[in-house]
Image: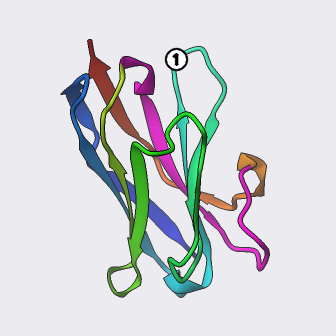
Amino acid sequence: QVQLVESGGGLVQAGGSLRLSCLASGRTFSSYHMGWFRQAPGKEREFVSVISGNGAVAEYADSVKGRFTTSRNNAKNTVYLQLNSLKPEDTAVYYCAADLGIRPLVRRDTEYDIWGQGTQVTVSS
């Protein structure tokens, strides 16, 4: 069974950067798409990004496009989310998730099968 563990969150000033990591164990990592989501206090969980199994294709929410970059190293069973030019409104718990289905990239959180425990990102103004 696939398990996901995020790391890399923390407190950063506006304009700063962080890199989140998500380490996967279990099934062949390169066979499934990996998504990033976030949830701020009092808000619904929202899509941030998704990357294909081979890392060739990625999609982003409009709110993070041009500032966040997702990548993966299948040899290390790890997916990354680089967060640049952070804003206070980026403050949230960030989750990685695995889509074990064989299909195009998806953005709905209900389509994802396995979730990590989340890592807190706090951006101060």
Q: Residue at x 40, y 24 (%)?
A: 91
Q: Residue at x 58, y 72 (%)?
A: 57
Q: Is residue 101 above or below residue 120?
A: below
Residue annotated with mark 1: 41
Q: Is residue 78 above or below residue 85?
A: below
Where's residue 66, x and y in %?
44, 45
Q: Place residue 113 in its image quadrant.
A: bottom right
Q: Place residue 121 in its image quadrant.
A: top left
Quadrant (top left/top right/bottom left/bottom right) for the N terminus: bottom right
Q: Does residue 46 appear to the left or right of 117 in the view shown?
A: right
Q: Is residue 52 above or below residue 48?
A: below
Mark 1: amino acid: Pro
Question: In this picture, which residue range is highlighted in magenta?
Answer: 88-107
Q: Nearer the viewer, residue 124 or 45?
A: 124
Q: Place residue 27 in its image quadrant.
A: bottom right
Q: Does residue 110 appear to the left or right of 52 in the view shown?
A: right
46 is within the stretch colored magenta: no
Q: Does residue 59 appear to the left or right of 101 in the view shown?
A: left
96 is within the stretch colored magenta: yes
